[in-house]
Structures are given as structure tokens and as C-alpha cells.
Image: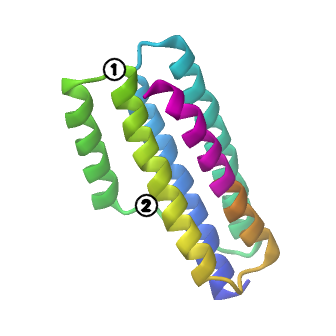
Amino acid sequence: MDEQTIKLLEECCSGCRMAVESFEQIKEYVKDTDLKKLISDYTEKHRSLEKEASSLLKESGNEEQSAGFMASALSRFTTEIKLTFNSDNSQVAKLLIDGCTMGIKTLGKKANQYDKADKKAGALAQKIIRIEEALLKELKDYL
């Protein structure tokens, strides 16, 4: 498997893993059952997409890289601080929208940067971006 494909798949894995970690962290603050279900549904979608990316990496003899500890810790700390003082639906939606936006920008940039990656990796990156866009659209109802 070529280097661009590996890098793009690693980015797919990393982004989905960070999304799942964020969803799991935020879920404990959510009181609204509809919002909780939405988060749960997208947690499963992201887990499935991470598994798909990881499987493609493993097929080529590569393993997914662990997410950067500092980025993950900073994200967790920031979320904890913001939700400790205000965990209403609007605040939760804002945090998740920020995460979606960052995921779309990051993965979109990487997909453009690694434009020689194989079609499966490129299609998976686009699928993740579409999932993020769909979540962003649904979250706007909670603002």
C-alpha cells in the first residue's frame, strides 16, 4: 500500500477515534433523550467507520497509529471545563458542531493532500465527511 493511502487511512482512524472519545465524554452530561440517542447513533457510525479504516490498514500489513495523547487530553479537558458550567442542549450542540467542523476541515485537507491515495481510502474519507456534515445538520436543531 502506498504512503498516501496509509496516511489518509490513519487520518480516518484517528478522526473517528477522537469523535467516539468526544461522544462518550459528552454523553454523560446530556439529559435530553433525543440528543442522547443522536449521539449514540453517531458514536456507532464512527466506530464502524474507524473499524473499516483499520481493516483496510491491516489488509496492507499496517496498524493504526494511536491518537496524540496531548491533543486527546487537551480536548477532554476543554470539554470538561465547558460542560461543567453549562451542559444544556445548546452548549452540547455547540461543542459537537465545533468538533464536526474541525473533522470536516482536517479530513478534507488530508484528502486533498493525499489525492494519490487509492480509491477505497478516498471514498472512505468522503464517507466520513458526509457523516460529519449530516451530524452537523442535525445538531443545528439543538442550538
Q: Is residue 59 above or below residue 43?
A: below
In the image, 79 versus 95, the foreground residue is 95
Q: Amino acid at mark 2?
A: Ala
Percent x, y for residue 96?
Answer: 44, 40
Q: Which residue is located at x 64 percent, y 84 percent?
A: 4
Q: Quadrant of the N terminus?
A: bottom right
Q: Residues within 10 Å of mark 1 (few under 14, many from 20)?
A: some
Instruction: From the image, tell me which residue sits under label 1.
Output: 88
Q: Quadrant of the C terminus?
A: top left
Q: Main secondary structure of the magenta part?
A: helix
Closer mark to the observer between disc 1 and disc 2: 1
Percent x, y for residue 109?
Answer: 54, 74
Q: Which residues are magenta?
A: 129-143
In the image, 92 versus 49, the foreground residue is 92
Residue sticking out furthest to the right: 119
Mark closest to the chain's N terminus, 1 or 2: 2
- When asked about the image quadrant of residue 78, the answer is top left
Q: Is residue 128 above or below residue 120?
A: above
Q: Which residue is located at x 56 percent, y 52 percent?
A: 16
Q: Residues within 10 Å of mark 2 (few under 14, many from 20)?
A: some
Q: Is residue 79 above or below residue 5?
A: above
Percent x, y for residue 79?
Answer: 29, 39
- When asked about the image quadrant of residue 67, the answer is bottom left
Numbered circle sitting on residue 67? 2
- Which secondary structure, mark 2? loop
- Residue 58 drawn in magenta: no
Classify residue 143 as left or right of residue 64: left
Q: Amino acid at mark 1?
A: Asp
Q: Which residue is located at x 52 percent, y 33 percent?
A: 139
- Which secondary structure, mark 1? loop
